[in-house]
Amino acid sequence: MSKSSPCLTDVAIYITGGRVQYNTFYVDNTIEGLYIVQRMDTGKTISIKRKPNVKPTIIDELGNKAIKEELTECELEELKKLEKEYAKFLKKSKPEDVFEVTELTNFIWKPKTETYIKTDIINKNKKNCN
């Protein structure tokens, strides 16, 4: 499971093969961290969190404004630039420097059926920055 970010859900589905329709993936914004991953064969479950101060706060600040459609075309391009720089940073970083992995005991798989807005397409019709 992951939080509802389009990037997080895409990564979770791509890496694990989990699917909502097969009860092997779901989205839950109440989880602590980014992901909870459970092995189907053993039930072993881990939580994956980003370490504090890894992601620049400006990305979330602008991202929240983008979801509310409060950014201009130029501000959206700046957000995309910041996100690309952050992605490059993550690719170069050692996972143990960026993420915390914790084993969860007695975790029970309880899929939620909430739907979430596809926030990656909200601003798709905005023009380019001039």
Image (cartoon, rainbow, N blue to C red):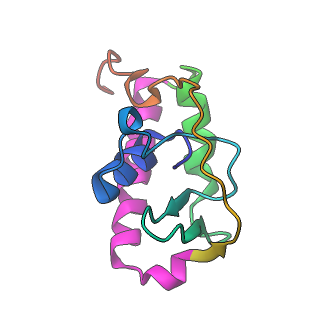
Return the x and y of residue 116 as percentages of the image width and height.
53, 25
Residue at 34% across, 78% down: 92
Please check the rendered image and state whether residue 127 is part of the magenta-colored stretch, yes or no: no
In terms of depth relative to the viewer, which is nearer, 38 or 54? Answer: 38
Q: How many marks?
A: 0
Residue at 35% across, 45% down: 10
Residue at 70% across, 56% down: 32
Return the x and y of residue 56 as percentages of the image width and height.
58, 60
Return the x and y of residue 43 as percentages of the image width and height.
53, 66
In the depicted structure, whether residue 122 falls above or below residue 89: above
In the depicted structure, whether residue 110 falls above or below residue 107: above
Q: Main secondary structure of the magenta part?
A: helix
Please check the rendered image and state whether residue 81 is part of the magenta-colored stretch, yes or no: yes
In terms of depth relative to the viewer, which is nearer, 67 or 75? Answer: 67
In the depicted structure, whether residue 41 falls above or below residue 4: below
Residue 114 lies in quadrant: top right
Looking at the rendered image, the quarter that the C terminus falls into is top left
Residue 115 lies in quadrant: top right
In terms of depth relative to the viewer, which is nearer, 72 or 124? Answer: 124
Which stretch appears magenta? 72-99
Left or right, 26 with reference to 126: right
Return the x and y of residue 81 as percentages of the image width and height.
37, 49
In terms of depth relative to the viewer, which is nearer, 123 or 113? Answer: 113
- Give the farthest residue toward the top: 125
Residue 111 lies in quadrant: top right
